Image: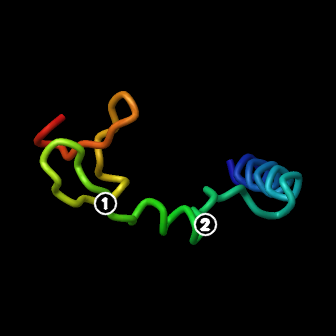
Amino acid sequence: MILRLILIAFIIYLLYKAFGGKFALPKKASKEEQTEANTLVECTKCGVYITYKEAVKKSGKIYCSDCA
């Protein structure tokens, strides 16, 4: 039983080292991408300002969620 645990731990260690000693983490958004997502845009229909990431995009126009 203990031998199996040691063997499994050793295999996990080998896999860990095979991937360069660290597993890939999700890529963080660059500052430029974050700034673009937080830029205020105007709704085409009602004129309300919302952030770009919250806007609804349809046919090349930008709408707030109420107008979409």
Estimate the x, y position of residue 53 in percent, counting from the top left.
36, 53
Q: Amino acid at mark 2?
A: Ser
Q: Residue furthest top?
A: 59
**Residue closer to the observer: 68 or 60:** 60
Q: Earlier in the sequence, mark 1 or mark 2?
A: 2
User: Local crowd at mark 1 within 10 Å, few (<14), some, or many (≥20)?
Assistant: some
Query: Measured from the top left, where is residue 32 in percent x and y?
Result: 58, 67
Name the image quarter holding the C terminus: top left
Q: Nearer the viewer, residue 15 or 45?
A: 45
Indicate which label's residue lies in the foreground, 1 or 2: 1
Which label was assigned to residue 25? none
Q: Residue at x 74, y 48 (%)?
A: 8
Is residue 62 shown above or below 24? above
Report which residue position mark 2 lands on: 30
Q: Position of residue 38 (x, y in %)?
A: 39, 65
Label 1 to label 2, Cα distance in Å? 17 Å
* Amino acid type of the residue that numbered disc 1 sits on in the rendered structure: Thr
Dot 2: within a 10 Å radius of its alpha carbon, few (fewer than 14), some, or many (20 or more) residues? few
Looking at the image, residue 35 sits to the left or right of residue 46; the answer is: right
| Residue 58 in picture, x, y percent from top left | 33, 31
The answer to whether 42 is drawn above or below residue 59 in the figure is below
Q: Is residue 53 left or right of residue 46?
A: right
* Numbered circles on residues, count: 2
- SS at mark 1 in the image: strand
Q: Hey, which quadrant is residue 52 in on the image?
A: bottom left
Q: Please name whichever residue, 30 or 14, is drawn nearer the observer in this view of the structure.
A: 30
Q: Which mark is residue 51?
A: 1
Q: Secondary structure at mark 2?
A: loop
Q: Residue at (48%, 69%) from the top-left corner?
A: 35
**Residue visible at 22% across and 60% down in the picture:** 49
Identify the colour scheme used.
Answer: rainbow
